[in-house]
Amino acid sequence: MSNVVIAVDGPVAAGKGTLARRLAAHLGLQHLDSGMIYRAAAARLLETGGQPVDAAAAEAAAKALSADDLTRPNLRDQAIGGAASKVAVIPAVRAALLEFQRRFVQTPPGAVIDGRDIGTVVCPDANVKLYVTASLDARAGRRHAELEARDGSADFKAIRAEISERDRRDMERETAPLRQADDAVTLDTSDLDADMAFQAALEIIEQSLKQQGNIAIESPASA
């Protein structure tokens, strides 16, 4: 299987990130969480003393981004997240990181990349496109369970409302809104656990690649 690109899109809390990482490991492909590259660019910017409101400095940080930046241990820090939300709205930063993503997936043997505009904007020619979704209640329930396990305090109604509002923003934003690509296969995980979703996705990928005439590789998981 030569340089295969698998795009995994979908709304928040649908399970696409976990699924994409597992698929990449199973298939022996690289994995890229597109949301983390904005955090990585912000981390690089702050490290050099730059400010998120400085468009030129933010663009320079984005253009200098490397795969090593994605392994920084502090990418989920609150300060990094705040800076990332500011640099993400700068057009030049988005353009630079779009190029980064496209270069990433062009590196053999290919990649599984997840986000909200992968199949529509970043990789419109991806070999396989999955649109991973779930009902609002299912997604809110998962996030609620996650937060309950973390600190024992979570409000389901508030979480549900927050996810609903996030969906609205993602779908209505002017730049690269969340939508399903015309040739993407829908994978509804509302009633699936992680193992079931993985098996369903793997079947879709294998069938699609077979139809395209690609030769499947022997995955590290089965070797």
Image (spheres, rainbow, N blue to C red):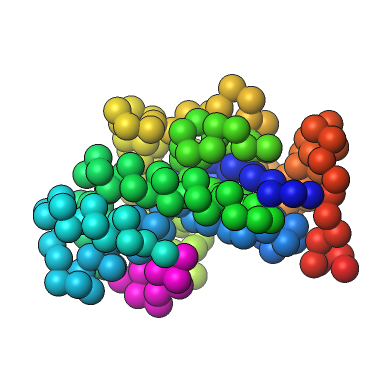
| Residue at the image point whose x is 40% and y is 69% from the top | 69
Q: Position of residue 203 (x, y in %)?
A: 81, 43
* Residue range (magenta): 67-77
Left or right: 23 with respect to 223? Answer: left
Left or right: 15 with respect to 45? Answer: right
| Residue at the image point whose x is 73% and y is 45% from the top | 201
Q: Is residue 28 above or below residue 184?
A: below
Whether residue 38 appears in this view of the structure is yes
Q: Position of residue 137 (x, y in %)?
A: 51, 41
Q: Position of residue 161 (x, y in %)?
A: 35, 42
Quarter of the image for residue 89 reads top left
Q: Is residue 120 above or below residue 149?
A: above
Asked whether residue 68 is drawn in magenta, I would say yes
Whether residue 193 appears in this view of the structure is no
Q: Position of residue 79 (x, y in %)?
A: 23, 68
| Residue at the image point whose x is 50% and y is 31% from the top | 120
Q: In the depicted view, which residue is nearer to us: 181 or 90? A: 90
Q: In the depicted view, which residue is nearer to us: 190 or 214? A: 214
Check the picture and name the quadrant holding the C terminus: bottom right
Q: Is residue 192 above or below residue 78?
A: above
| Residue at the image point whose x is 63% and y is 30% from the top | 184
Left or right: 122 with respect to 131? Answer: left
Quarter of the image for residue 174 reads top left
Quarter of the image for residue 150 reads bottom left
